Amino acid sequence: MLSTIGLIGALALLIWMTVKGVNILIAGPVAAAVVAATSGIAWLPPLAGAEAPDYATSYMAGFTGFFADWFLMFLLGAIFGEVMGASGAAASVAQWIIDKIGIRHAVLAVVAACAVLTYGGVSVFIVAFSVYSLAVHLFRQANLPRRFIPAALCFGSVTFTMTSAGSPEIQNLIPMQYLGTTAYAGWQVSLVVAVLMAGVGYVLLQRMVKRAVANGEHFEARPGDDVVDENRVLPHPLLCLLPLAAVLGVFMIFQYPQALGPFSSIMPEESLGKWALVVALGAGTAIAVLVGRKSKGAMPAAFSRGATGAVVAITNTCAVVGFGAVAALSPAFQQALEMVKDLPGDPLLGAAIAVTVIAGLTGSASGGQTIALPLIAPAYLGAGAEPGELHRTVAIASGALDSLPHNGYIVTTIRAICGETHQDAYGPVGVLTVLVPLAGLALALALFILF
């Protein structure tokens, strides 16, 4: 009982501290300490029994493990975003979009840019870095409140694209190894759900932005923004699209070398996996520097800002991952796993509840799947669940409660990339990344169960 109270209380405390603006590097360890104190987990290695876990080692293992896995991607992603801004490429593309589709579609342009990169395989952690500079210029031109930029970035990257059939994101690929399915499992229902989430989410986002504008909110410039010089000659917009195209194209080539057909012999035989993103971001950054060669004087500062921003962003995420690592050790968490494994009723409904709850507790869609699937997949497949339907249900379910305020991607996007506070920015983010995916999950379950 004490462990259960401690786990729920620690999660509530973490969310409360995050919303109140407590630095996540403090909030994460404090919340994890509450879990340890109420779960009988030793504080330090010398105090733990033989082979028993301890708070300090477990927290830092989660923290440093994520850092080691993703730092290069965060570094190059942050530098790429800064170079796109400093080179004038983001401003040029923003102006071109405004000229072509009209200023009233600025929000749509940001969402679409994120969606293309996400569905193209660029990690959701990096998409926000890549599109942020473009979003700032578009919102400035349209005079829209910048507190909605995180919502536009998150909506375009972690909702209707991340968990849809065919998406190369890890959240769509993890079920394959447990269910023997393909990335296109349940594509018919997935298509319907994706269209619903995209349409409903965009309408909601537009309404929230319009309501804020009607209440007198507008774009507010900040000292760190790229300086807008009316007399500055910007690079041609088509040239400025090359860095984004390079990131997507190079990533696809190194991720799926076999797709080159007769030319695949000049590429690695095997996919580079996540390391393809390092190559892609490096190529995109190099091209962005060339496109902005007339602004070469601004490049050293852009690289420096990117490096600093990357460290802040990834450590924010690591702090939440560390909390999840400690939380997973608590008896209450293990009891929760046993409970969700044996939920009665339709297997798809049980799987949806299990993955949703675990993803919420860990603040991670991929973490929720990785923990839940080894436990529930054999039982639910044995109960007659169709593997493709189970795959799609699990994928969509993982993208709902994972986006609570303490989620690493949410914290990074709101705080480190966009420079906003949870109090100002999380409301729209929560509507679009929690409520909309939950509605999509309900629709998917209805379609699978009824038809």
Image (cartoon, rainbow, N blue to C red):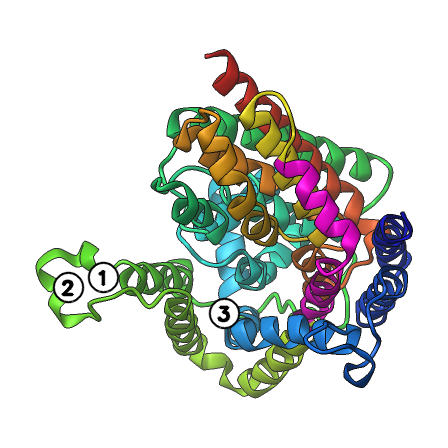
The answer to whether 365 appears left or right of 360 in the picture is: left
Which residue is tagged 2? Answer: 264
Return the residue at label 1: 257
Picture coordinates of residue 268, whole percent (x, y): 22, 71
Disc tally is 3
Report the residue at 61% width, 41% height from top: 355
Image coords of residue 316 (percent x, y): 72, 69
Kind of residue sitting beneath label 1: Pro
In percent of the image, x 67 and y 42: which residue is there? 338
State how far apart marks 3 and 1 are (Cα).
38 Å
Whole-percent x and y of residue 39?
84, 60
Residue at the outermost top position: 450
Left or right of 419 in this view: 155: left
Q: Is residue 308 visible?
A: yes
Residue 7 at x, y percent in the picture: 83, 53
Q: Are marks 3 and 1 in contact (CB under 8 Å)?
A: no
